[in-house]
Image: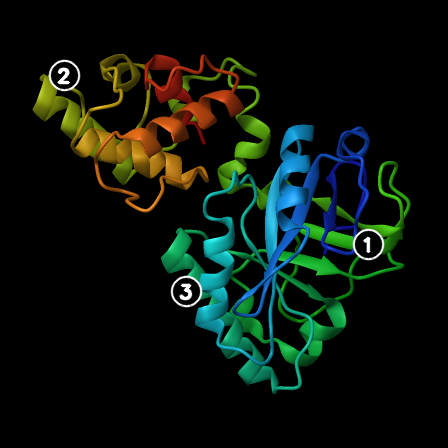
Amino acid sequence: MQSRGNKYIKGIDISKWETGIDYKKVRESKDVVIIKATEGVNFIDSMFERHYIGCKEAGFKIGFYHFFSDKTDPTEQARNFWNAIKGKHLDILPVLDIETSIRSKREVTNRCLEFLQEMKILSGYNCIVYTYTSFAIEKLDTRLSKYPLWIAHYGVSTPGNNGIWNSWVGFQYTDKERVPGVPNPCDADYFTEGIFIEDRGIRCLNLDANNNELWKKSINGPLVKELQRELNIQFNKNLNIDGYFGENTLNACILVRRGAKGNITKIIQQRLLNKGYSLGVYGLDGVFGTKTEMAVKRFQKDCGLKIDGIVGRETWKALFRK
């Protein structure tokens, strides 16, 4: 595994045990906060909302974690977690915190997989798995290796071998960090860009950071082909359906605003969901209503774009950026 160091993103994780935080002061030294949201099937952390509001106002990249209960149904736990966070601004992949169990290694892993699979269905995201090195060795198996790892291992610069993962996206290296703005010692972490939903947390803030051709900086594949096909069918744009979002495709994109309906709106909604923006209960319905407009405005604000709720040239470019 990689060693910790200043080349990584600095962050903390907090719960009801951290009170009296000066969030803006903490923001001077940390970029990321991961907040405890839920535990079990009906518990919501008492500081969840307060921490979220404070961290959002201070400008952190925000994520949430669920503390996994050994006693309750994994599917219901996933639903409790997603119901708590689905309306929130989300920069970071959701986190499953698994660190206690009296069950066998196979049982624990089975239960984790049930939770993770339900979260994928509900949210569309593959969660990050948080655990301790010793717990991973004793209670988890290699079926979890496809999920990103946030590892806790204190007093070392390099996490120990756990037999499942060989790299981490998060490394909690202490639970006793003195962080300016937090009254008492707290957990502290290093993170890679792998924690972010499509790296939005870093890249969305600097859309024109280099002069690479647009198609190199943008996603490619089936969704781009679908967009190109719809532009050809509906507006006779004569695009090559090659799956690359380049200047020709960008130039062909139309203005889309509240009141629009159809497949192009659905493509916009898909990209918003991919980037972590909630669309409300109706989700991917192809209708550019109030919730979609609000999501577009939040996305535009996060990307430093004009906040008008209209998907124009710069918003199209940002939506399809890697």
Q: Describe the element under mark 3 as helix, strand or loop.
A: helix
Displayed quadrant of residue 16:
bottom right
The amino acid marked with disc number 1 is: Tyr
Corner quadrant of residue 67: bottom right
> Residue 75: where, in percent of width, then height?
44, 70
Q: Which mark's residue is nearer the viewer, 1 or 2? A: 1
Considering the image in quadrants, where does the C terminus appear? top left
Q: Earlier in the sequence, mark 1 or mark 2?
A: 1
Asked if one can make out residue 235 in the rendered structure from this viewpoint, the answer is yes
Residue drawn at the location 47% of the way across and 15% of the way down:
305
Judged left or right of residue 303, residue 248 is: left
- Residue 1 point in image, percent of width and height: 72, 56
Residue 117 versus residue 168 in the image, above or below: below
Q: Is residue 65 above or below residue 249?
A: below
Marks 1 and 2, how far apart at CA:
54 Å
Question: How far across and down, in percent of the image, does residue 244 sit?
Answer: 30, 28
- Quickly name the residue at label 3: 118
N-terminal of the two: label 3 or label 1? 3
Q: Nearer the viewer, residue 106 or 77?
A: 77
Q: Give the x, y percent position of residue 178.
A: 91, 45
